Image (tube, rainbow, N blue to C red):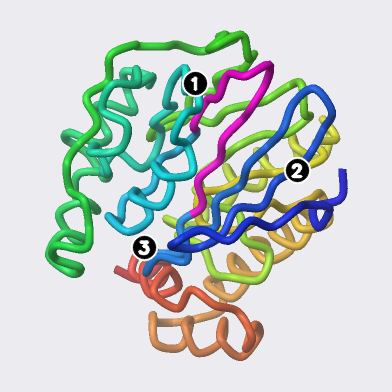
Amino acid sequence: MNKRDFTTIKLDQGEMHVYDFGGVKLHAYQTNDPLSDETFLVEKAGQWVLLEPPCFKDSIAALAKYLEGKAVAGLLVAYHGAGGSLLPQVPRCATANAVDYTKNGGGKALIDQFTAAFGGAFDHEIHTVTNLIGEGPVSIGGIDFVIHQTAEAFDVEIPEINAVYTHMLGHDCHSIVAGAGHADGIISQLKGYIQKGYDLILTSHYTPEDLKDVQAKIDYLEKLKAIAASCADGKAFKEAVQAQYPAYSGENYLDMTTGFFFG
């Protein structure tokens, strides 16, 4: 499946990119919200499962309208625990560590930060998880997924379309990297994607990507570590990274990475 082989549907906020795999369709919602969030819906035999709901009220309203009359079997809530006003009658599925991440950990800190930054446009309501899931296979609405628990929450493999969801990739934008050890962990994970030969890598902050993009991110992370090792302070590090990748977006993520390496 080519990452550009989709049909576009304009929504009141953002647009939907629909990938047709035959018996299964992937609906990739490009919200165009202030955080460039991406939400995914898997459709099979009249059943829908939503993966990583949006957090801004305009996006929530547009997505709810798109799903009117659709049988939504469940929401998988991983790294984005806010936006709880979306489809309140639909079961929420998450791992125990994802729940803790949202209520007590880094997810909560981000929700508090975004609430302060965006005010009423951001839906700070936390999703109430109704179905705890664990590592390994799970079926929701007759659609098979494989849950891979991570340090913060969980990633999701979708075998029927040979795709995997993880929080962040972005082959031409900066990422939040919490030091050299974290970079090595991401590199190991990404090399695993190449070994498995996924057609699409889905992330909540970028459009669907492919294995060429995965390799580009591996190269970026290796270069990031090398630059950090050669710099004496955060200012020099950030300037060197920007000089190496002048066209990359996500400067706020680079700022966070700089803080982790040189905090």
In the picture of the structure, the residue carrying the numbered disc 3 is 260
Name which residue lies at 57% across and 8% down. 139
Q: Secondary structure at mark 2?
A: strand
Name which residue lies at 76% across and 58% down. 213
Tell me the mark number nearer the camera, choosing from 1 and 3.
Answer: 1
In the picture of the structure, the residue carrying the numbered disc 2 is 19
User: What is the quadrant of residue 256 in the picture?
Assistant: bottom left
Pointer 2 with pointer 3, Cβ within 8 A: no
Residue at mark 2 to residue at mark 1: CA–CA distance: 19 Å
Please rate how many residues cluster around mark 1, counting C-alpha atoms within 10 Å: few if below 14, some from 14 to 19, many from 20. Answer: some
Type of amino acid at the residue the image marks with label 1:
Ala
x, y (%) of residue 211?
A: 81, 49
**Mark closest to the chain's N terminus, 1 or 3:** 1
Type of amino acid at the residue the image marks with label 3:
Phe
How many badges with numbers are in the image?
3
Which quadrant holds the C terminus?
A: bottom left
Does residue 58 appear left or right of residue 195 in this picture? left
Residue at mark 2 to residue at mark 3: CA–CA distance: 37 Å
Does residue 136 appear left or right of residue 32 in this picture? right
Name which residue lies at 51% across and 57% down. 205
Tell me the mark number nearer the camera, choosing from 2 and 1.
Answer: 1
